[in-house]
Amino acid sequence: MEKKPLIPIDEGPLDIWYESPSVMAVKKPKGIAVHPKNESESGTLLNRLFQHNRWLAQMETSTSAGVLHVFEQNDHGLMLFSKNDDYQEELTKALESNEMTFCYFITIKDDHKIDIPTTENYHFTIKSQKQLFGYTVIDLRATVGNTRTIRDLLFPELESSETTFYCYEIKLTLPHTGELHTFSLRDSSKDYPNIVVFHAPPCSSCREAREFLLDNGFIYQDNSVMDKEVFKKMMEINGGKKVIPTIIIGDQIEMGFDRNRLKGLLGVK
């Protein structure tokens, strides 16, 4: 029998990374809330999830059906949703018992040195921490799925607008199989790279390249070749070739925007 969700159904783009009888992994975009505040509100990720008659836990009675953890509006990346009531309790218990792992790129405006607090409730590991182009970039492994909780623990003095979270990997035991499973948007063995982009308006491929980087959690040094000195520098790097965008990833120079090529260089899946 088909169920009807309590909240409105929205049409809109969806990036379903995994779907099984127990859980759904979805890539959340920036700029939208996870679920509505009341049963008449629309425009959230959860509203979109129902457009193909998907079943989620408590979908007929709850405005947060299937929601296991919450990202703030401008945070993005992988999120988990419980598919049905039978597995909701087991998944919630696994979260509360630190049995799930979430990997984040966290970008913070300005230079910051982050110290991990002592807490019995959650586990944190900093895989790397570096300063790039006026930002601090932290590669963090945590047993916390709510980004507000991490902000309150690690950056209590900062405003939410000063930090952005990108969840690129989640590990958990799937309730319907009992097996450990990893959802990943990138090759986690690759380091977070230095990236420089030379571009010019109204170049559409430049815009797509920059959006691709941001959508996949990477910051970069932004250089417009409308400035004569910047243009001269790009031409020197390109061996005299006038090609935009020109993207430098570490020591690798890429002329033009080749999405699959960039995926390989950055470890994006």
Image (tube, rainbow, N blue to C red):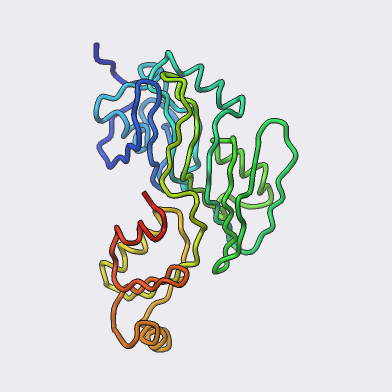
Foreground of the two, 192 or 5: 192
Q: Up-down: is 68 above or below 226? A: above
- Residue pictured at 44% horizontal, 32% vertical: 80
- Residue pictured at 52% horizontal, 51% vertical: 105
Q: Quadrant of the N terminus?
A: top left
- Residue pictured at 56% horizontal, 53% vertical: 163
Foreground of the two, 201 or 119: 119
Which x, y percent locates residue 39?
Answer: 38, 25
In-image side of 144 versus 201 (left or right): right
Foreground of the two, 5 or 242: 242
Q: Up-down: is 246 above or below 167? A: below
Which x, y percent locates residue 217?
Answer: 45, 54
Q: Up-down: is 30 above or below 23? A: below
**How many numbered marks have been drawn onto this rendered protein structure?**
0
In-image side of 121 versus 105 (left or right): right
- Residue pictured at 28% horizontal, 18% vertical: 4
Q: Up-down: is 262 above or below 125? A: below
Specify the farthest residue to the top: 1
In-image side of 125 versus 204 (left or right): right
Where residue 11 sits, quadrant-wise, is: top left
Which x, y percent locates residue 115?
Answer: 72, 50
Foreground of the two, 186 or 224: 186
Which x, y percent locates residue 44?
Answer: 37, 37
Where residue 60 sits, quadrant-wise, is: top left
